[in-house]
Image (cartoon, helix red, strand yellow):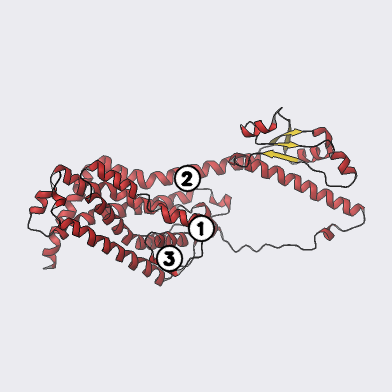
Amino acid sequence: MTGIALKPMLVVFLKEVRENLRDRRTVLNTLLTGPLLAPVIFALIINGVVARELDKADKPLPVPVIGAEYAPNLIAALKQQNIVIKDAPSDPERAVREMDADLVLSIPKNFADSWRRGEPAQVELIYDASQRDAQGSVGRLRGALESYSQRTGALRLLARGLSPTSMQPVVVADRDQSTAQTRSGTLFAMLPYFFILGAFIGGMALAIDTTAGERERQSLEPLFVNPVSRSRILLGKLAATSAFALTSVLLGIIAFSLVGRVLPTEKLGMTLEIGPHFALLTMFVMLPLVFLIATLQTLAAAFAKSFREAQTYLSLLMFVPAVPTMLLSLFPVKTETWMYAVPLMGQQITITRLMRGDAVTAEQLGLCFVCTTTAALLVYAMTAAIYRGERLAIST
């Protein structure tokens, strides 16, 4: 009897999968472009930024200087640290704002007088903190100036018969508890969002076509005329939508695991390890979320009378997974057990902790799975109620 009950659902499932596979453009977008585009773009950006910063660190740093003649010893020390002294522009503030120069060093006329009196001699760095490309140059020059200041201060103390350590009554020793894998959490914080977004993209086309599309083509009403309960028809459609969404998630995991091997993470003191353990647990917590997403998409598409209208609804629905990502990024909080019970947030936290190499207990995984499954069943009940109504089959 069970096999007979499942047969209509299986027929609907195979029908929807076969029809979706025939649309090669849709399959290309959902199963290739969506899961693969984000990892490729991510890899290109990270490789480009790291290569550029490392290249800038190895090359001489050009620094326009105002009043270089007032501090010849400082200029000589900067040159020894691979800094090239350039003539300053006539309007340094404008040059920095318009990105003609990363920064400008200004040395005042009273620098030498302050130096001879043993007083702090002030210099001025002119830069634009909003220009990311200039941050590396500013940090490099600031480090060179601080190194020169510390070395000169130590020589002044020695000249007065004092030990340079007397100026450091407290020495701070760092004991960093982070690892190369946990540090990757800052760089790859968007990784869970890409997986969740992949589930939305993977099932969106099929969710629209199996509901709003068939309704617009007036093929939904003949399907409902068959002596099969609408709940089985709905389950077949949801199974097909979930299958494509889950496939998209799996392809995304594989793509990021390959990208992690080519990214120069070791140069950043990080590592991205996406192995079978990570993939298995990620797929486990994503499974009920995929069904929840497929059901939500089908529910939203059921209220649309046309394919285009359903696209609008589901496009707005895609902003939903961005909410927990933004909240956790803007307000980082300590992970609490109740967070695993919140759909989307539970998956976000679980995947992030797995990526960082943190321990996730079986109870936390089970709580995430059960609560998301419960939410999916509630949305399924709402969708089933819509499917039982007569208005769904009417296209006008």
First reached walking from the N terminus: tag 1 or tag 2? 2
Q: Tell me if 248 is positioned left or right of 65 in this view.
A: left
On the rendered image, what quadrant is the N terminus found in? bottom left
Residue behind mark 1: 331
Residue 81 vs residue 258, the one in the foreground: 81
Q: Is residue 131 visible?
A: yes
Label 3 sits on a secondary structure element that is helix
For discs 3 and 2, the disc positioned in front in the rendered view: 3
- Between 282 and 331, the one nearer to me in the picture: 331
**Residue at x-position 20% and y-position 54%:** 237
Q: Under tag 1, what secondary structure? A: loop
- The residue located at (27%, 40%) in the rendering is 25
Front position in the image: 9 or 257: 9
Q: CA distance from mark 3 to mark 2?
A: 30 Å
Determine the image quadrant of residue 227.
Answer: bottom left
Q: CA distance from mark 1 to mark 2?
A: 27 Å
Mark 1: amino acid: Phe
Q: Which residue is mark 2?
A: 43
Q: Assign the C terminus to one quadrant of the image.
A: top left
Q: Earlier in the sequence, mark 3 or mark 2?
A: 2
Alpha-carbon span between mark 1 and mark 3 = 14 Å
Q: Which mark is residue 322?
A: none
Residue 90: x and y in percent read 71, 27
* Eye-nearest disc, 1 or 2: 1
Amino acid type, residue under disc 2 in the picture: Ala
Determine crowd level at label 1: few under 14, some 14-19, many 20+ residues with C-alpha closer than 10 A: few
Q: Evaluate whether residue 271 shows in this view.
A: no
Quarter of the image for residue 290 reads: bottom left
Amino acid type at circle 3 is Met
Q: Residues within 10 Å of mark 3 (few under 14, many from 20)?
A: some
Residue pointed to by mark 3: 339
